[in-house]
Amino acid sequence: MPRFVAKDNYAAGFGYQWNQHRLTQLDSHSGMPISRDRLMSASGWSVAELHGKNVLECGSGAGRFTEVLCETGASVTSFDISSAVHANVASNGHFPNLRLVQASIYELPFKKESFDFLVCFGVLQHTPDVEKAFKTIFQYLRPGGRFCIDVYAAIVAYTHPRHLLRPLTRRIPPARLYTVVEKVVPRLLPLSMMLSAVPAAGPYLARLVPVANHRYLGLRNKNTLRNWSVLDTFDWFAPRYETPQTRRRLERWTTELHLRDVSIERRRGLYVIRGTK
């Protein structure tokens, strides 16, 4: 697997979490089409549209969406700056239509304007310069190519209580922080689940407990629910960077790039941006 970055970089925590949870979010492991439904619903694309096309996935993590994209028959090029690429290749390396590299979103080793589709989920808010990352990836999408990107929504994300703890937790070495999260989640998740079951106010009450709650996904197995919670709770507290964005700022960037048919939709704590270059 080609590498274009140093092993030690700002995304070390992501590398740690995805190698710990290589299989957790893969549809083939959970037995539920959670990643597939999210990708297809957010993008509005179909399997037929993706089949045979060149797709660039920006920031693969352990490969939950890589798997879905490869199964469409698309020619998938995926990258991640972290050692998560090891988890991805272990799970998805058998796909002959996958090209996987370790690279920075700011310096990609690909031919510009060479991709028909561009996907970037769960990445931009964790880069050092979100605007630069957003604008850079469009250099690789051909004119007329379609894109789907998400990013944390500013107002919603900034009101989450995790931001009271992040100034401390993001400085803790990943292995040590993960050990803490593993101990805390089983104790607090039952309280979060109980609060989230309260009619109407449940989602807001659950936010008061600093652990990730996936009731809305319909996960029924207790071990699966715990693993998803450990993973995403660590994902809240470990990243060096987390910079949510406002709708107005996203609108300005898409206008400056002259993107067409742009839609910006709020989905839970995210803005989903899709359209055509």
Image (cartoon, helix red, strand yellow):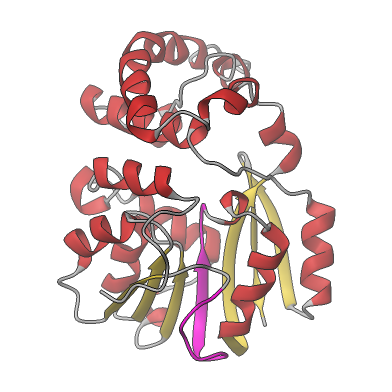
Q: Which of 82 and 39 is in front in this view?
A: 82
Residue 21 appears in the figure: no
Q: Quadrant of residue 183?
A: top left
Task: Give the magenta range.
Answer: 107-122
Determine if the magenta segment contains residue 136: no
Image quarter in which the N terminus is found: bottom left
* Residue pictured at 73% horizontal, 49% vertical: 245
Q: In this view, does 229 lie above or below 247?
A: above
Where residue 14 appears, as percent x and y from the top left, is: 41, 46
Query: Where does the C terminus fall, quadrant-wise?
Result: bottom right
Q: Which residue is drawn at 25% across and 59% down?
A: 86
Q: Position of residue 256 (x, y in %)?
A: 83, 75
Q: Is residue 255 above or below residue 60?
A: below
Quarter residue 219 falls in: top left
**Image coords of residue 185 (percent x, y):** 36, 17
Q: As displayed, is residue 255 above or below residue 165? A: below
Spot occupied by residue 141 in the image (x, y as percentages of width and height): 57, 84
Q: Nearer the viewer, residue 97 or 216?
A: 97
- Foreground pick, 107 / 254: 107
Give the dominant element type of the magenta stretch: helix, strand or loop: loop
Q: In this view, does 9 lie above or below 158?
A: below
